[in-house]
Image (cartoon, grey):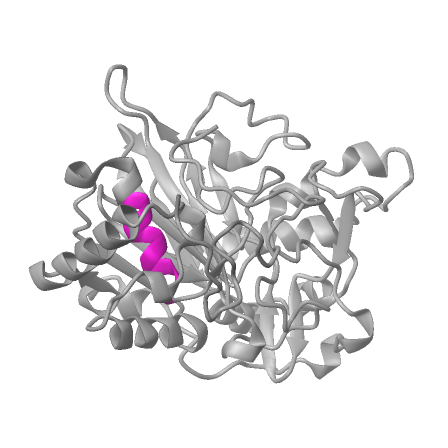
Amino acid sequence: MAPSIIAKDGLVSSGVRVKTSGQLEPEYSLLGSYEDFPKRIEGLTVWKAEDYRENPEKWTHVWNNEEVEEIEAATDGFLNAGYNLTDITKELFHLPKLASFLESVRQDLLYGKGFILFKGFPVGRWGNKKSAAAYMGIGTYLGYFVSQNSRGHVLGHVKDLGDDASQIDKVRIYRTNARQFFHSDDSDLVGLLCMASALEGGESDLISSHHVFNVLQEERPDVVETLSKPIWYFDRKGETSKGQKEWIRASVFYWYNGRVYTKWDPYYVRSLTRFSDKGLVPPLSDAQIEALDILEDTCLRLSLHMILEVGDIQFLSNNHVLHARTAYIDNPPPAARRHLMRLWLSVPETEGGWKLPFADSKDLKRGGIQVDDTTENAPLDAE
């Protein structure tokens, strides 16, 4: 059994640790009106697909042999010490040569283009547990793990488990093979490690939400205004703590602390008819329906397409990047089904993350999904 230590980040390896803060409504008094928004966003977070489509070297890093050896040594040292995956911290996962590089990646994710693709993780040789430990170890240099569902999974698994994707009020789409529309996850950063690819489809699309904002400001400022109002209700699909509401009222575009922040997932907006039919939340207006359709169409028109191969890791910002996935068909048995390991990472404002108009902005593990006192855990495959 691993010894109980208190790491510098405040997490306790014995299992008593900082909880994910969970889903919160914004502090409405802090929200600016549409008139407060800039007419145009400038800077590194604004990029066009054509800037990168023919230049993968600008957003791809291939691990070299020395880097793989350093990651593997840190992974073996951590696992051989007998720790659980949820115990991983930078202090327990030593990357002396890669640390400064990963800090530059973190800064680029937060304040630059907001995405990177790592290639060359030897997942076939390492298997699920060692790959997960190595992946999570790298994640500790970018942020803090937050729970991704009501079961406390800090290591998630994007895999088709046969759930009915049409039951959008009950089912999380990552557990199906259906298309995922452009969205952001409930964390500052998200990572995806490809353990097995599909027979067909399951490809990735990314877009700078700041570029989308600029285009919509030029083409349809009325849509931006609709998206900037806190009139959008997001379904929590039953992943709530005792006494909490089944939905959150929020905006899509936020103007706060000099930045435009985006929070969006159309599946969680369209699934609320069971409540709107009862008059508990207002139904989507014609303007909202048009806005969500135009937002999706604009993202599709402007997005960067990429394919994740086995051993690839994609990290991206949820604050200013939207991502999507095409539908897919799995390989027939006995071949492995498409499988991505997922991380949701928090970067609180106290450690360089964006200052956000939410009560947990300074929390170490802000965002995510926390239900009651569910303990975080890291399953090695989909459950």
| Left or right for 170, reference 212 | right
Between 146 and 203, the one nearer to me in the picture = 146
Identify the residue at horizontal 39%, vertical 53% (top origin).
Answer: 191
Q: Quadrant of the N terminus?
A: top left
Residue occupying the point 91% across, 39% down = 279
Evaluate whether residue 196 shows in this view.
no
Q: Residue furthest left?
A: 65
Pick the front one: 95 or 348: 95
| Residue sitting nearer the eye, 188 or 173 | 188
Numbered label tally: 0
Chief secondary structure of the magenta span?
helix
Membership of 46 in magenta stretch: no
Residue projecting furthest to the right: 279
- Residue lying at 65% horizontally and 71% vertically, measured from the top left: 361
Residue 227 rendering spot, x and y as whole percentages = 68, 62
Residue 356: % across, % down: 64, 73
Boundaries of the magenta span: 131-141
Q: Is residue 31 above or below residue 165?
A: below
User: In the visual, does 117 lie left or right of 151?
Assistant: left
Residue 157: where, in percent of width, then height? 43, 37
Q: Is residue 132 magenta?
A: yes
Q: Quadrant of residue 187?
A: bottom right
Give the x, y percent position of residue 315.
37, 58
Up/down of 162 relative to 342, above or below: above
* Residue situated furthest top in the rendering: 333
Asked if residue 88 can be seen in this view, the reply is yes
Residue for point 40% across, 80% down = 44
